[in-house]
Amino acid sequence: MNVGVRKALLAVAVIVMTAAMAALAEGGLDQPVHASFPDGRHASLRRLVCDMVEEYGRHTGHADLLREAVDGRVGEDPPAGWRP
């Protein structure tokens, strides 16, 4: 996935979360959102926020994999003698 696509996906995520936060301020987590299931039922804001938290966590892990590939550090602690 190239940089432009990643930036576009991040921009969409920011837009969705901004809209979710505005909706949350207006009506709480149990209100329906525009997103719907194939059978026509609408998801709740609670479901949307949970899905976004899950996606954010997944992509944070991906970013960590990229960082590991760049600087060679893996795991939580740098190897002995490692300097930035």
Image (cartoon, rainbow, N blue to C red):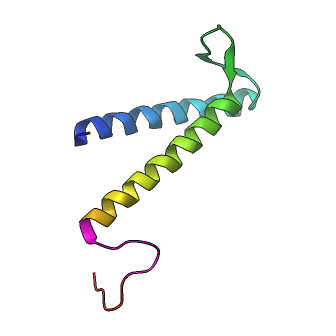
Q: In which quarter of the image is residue 3?
A: top left
- In the image, 11: left or right of 71? right
Question: Up-down: is 80 above or below 66?
Answer: below
Q: In this view, does 14 lie above or below 57?
A: above
Residue 13 in picture, x, y percent from top left: 46, 35
Residue 7: quarter of image: top left
Q: Please, is residue 41 above or below residue 14 in the view?
A: above
Could you tell me if residue 81 is visible in this image? yes
Query: Which stretch did the figure color magenta?
Result: 70-78
Q: Position of residue 82 (x, y in %)?
A: 30, 86
Classified by dominant secondary structure, the portion drawn in magenta counts as loop
Which residue appears at 65% of the width and 8% of the height?
Answer: 39
Vertical side of 6 occupied by 62: above or below: below
Q: Quadrant of the N terminus?
A: top left
* Callout count: 0
Q: Which of 33 and 42 is in front in this view?
A: 42
Q: Nearer the viewer, residue 13 or 78?
A: 78
Residue 21 visible (yes or no):
no
Give me the residue at 41% from left, 31% from top: 12
Residue 40 painted magenta: no
Q: Position of residue 52 (x, y in %)?
A: 56, 38
The residue located at (50%, 46%) in the rendering is 56
Choose top left, top right, bottom left or bottom right for residue 23.
top right
| Residue 47 pos. (x, y %) | 67, 31
Look at the image and say whether residue 73 sits in the magenta stretch. yes
Name, please, the residue furthest toward the top. 40
Q: Residue at x 54, y 36 (%)?
A: 17
Which quadrant does the C terminus fall into? bottom left
79 horizontally vs 30: left or right: left
